[in-house]
Amino acid sequence: MQLISLLQAGKGQNADALSELCGVSRRTLFRDLDLLRQAGVPVLFDDDEGYYRLEHPYFLPPTAFTAEEALSMLLVCYELGANGRMPFYSAARQAAIKLEASLPANLREQVRSVTAAVQIHLTPTNPLAGAEPIYRQLLHCASHREAVRIRYTSFADDAEIMTKLSPYRLLFSRHSWYAIGRSSLHREVRTFHVGRISNLELLAERFEVPHQFSIDRYLGNAWHLIPEPGPHSEVLVRFEKLVARNVAEVHWHKTQRVEFLPDGRLEFRVTVSGLGEISWWLLGYGDQVEVLQPARLRRMVADRVTRLAARYAEEG
């Protein structure tokens, strides 16, 4: 299904791009393309462009969903499409309604009874009011490999900037949508918050995504979205017993290691590129956490706590 979706989106993809996007080897990709042809999917290879594509728009035939599959699809679509929980994807709720209507009556009733008993609370998101046209244009350009020029309010540069952007990927992370790609102004790959793009101009210029590029490789060991230059930092913090188990139960970062102490406290170790983002996360735990190393992070948190205490200190 993923391969068909990629083939029918835009003008086509070459074998390297398809294998990377699907997360498989070239050998597996060629085997899967053959399987699609054998199943009647009209896969063509354009010799001039070197791209694979579909001969004409192709839609999968109706699928016999199991109760578990239908339930999973409906829950995800209902929740992501409800009240803008996933910005720009309100259509997901309409898709869920159509999917439910297409199910056999007995399965439809079974799914309704289960979905009525389940509710998912998602992390609050930025509604990105008025930014949907920008997002749709970025999505088009990312899928067609077309560059754009954007006007952007940059917190890092403390100014409104103009730059040519080659949007490699669109990423939804935690609260909002981001465009990740090469910026001509910065001469490197950067992350741009979609809600801070005030103007976008389509350019008659194509780009190629570097073969080795991936979001995971680009972000590296960043705590969230901002990889900082310089050597990685080995962070060791100690959480008090009150919050220790709550912290240990969540997979916060791909490098984290946790160890409970005999008194119930938790030692939390992580390797990160940059200390700014993790410092704000630690401050959210107040007096229930102590930074043990590195010294620079300990001073950073201490300075912010000192300023916070001064703000709330009684006068006189």
Image: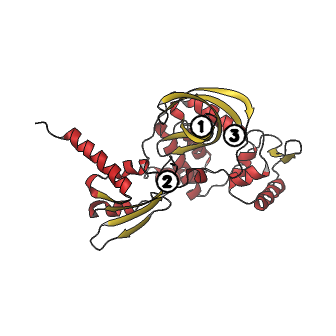
Which numbered dot is residue 171?
none
Q: Quadrant of residue 287?
A: bottom left
Do the residues bearing badges 1 and 3 touch, measured as CB atoms within 8 Å?
Answer: no
Image coordinates of residue 289 in percent, x first then y, are 30, 58
Q: Quadrant of residue 151?
A: top right
Nearer the viewer's eye, disc 1 or disc 3?
A: 1
Residue under pointer 3? 143
Mark 1 and mark 2: Cα distance apart in space: 19 Å
User: In which quadrant will I find the C terminus?
Assistant: top left
The residue drawn where x is 68% and y is 57% is: 23
In the foreground, 156 or 198? 156
- Element class at badge 2: loop
Image coordinates of residue 9 in percent, x first then y, are 72, 41
In the foreground, 123 or 283? 283
Q: Residues within 10 Å of mark 2 (few under 14, many from 20)?
A: many
The residue drawn where x is 62% and y is 33% is: 136
Question: Which numbered disc flags the more N-terminal residue, 2 or 3?
Answer: 3
Residue under pointer 2? 273
Q: Residues within 10 Å of mark 1 (few under 14, many from 20)?
A: few
Q: Residues within 10 Å of mark 3 (few under 14, many from 20)?
A: some
Mark 2 and mark 3: Cα distance apart in space: 30 Å
Residue under pointer 1? 186
Q: Amino acid at mark 2?
A: Ser
The residue drawn where x is 83% and y is 42% is: 55
Q: Amino acid at mark 1?
A: His
5 horizontally vs 248: left or right: right
The residue drawn where x is 47% and y is 34% is: 155
- Element class at badge 1: loop
Q: Is residue 60 visible?
A: no
Question: Which numbered disc flags the more N-terminal residue, 1 or 3?
Answer: 3
- In this rendering, the answer to whether 280 lies above or below 147 is below
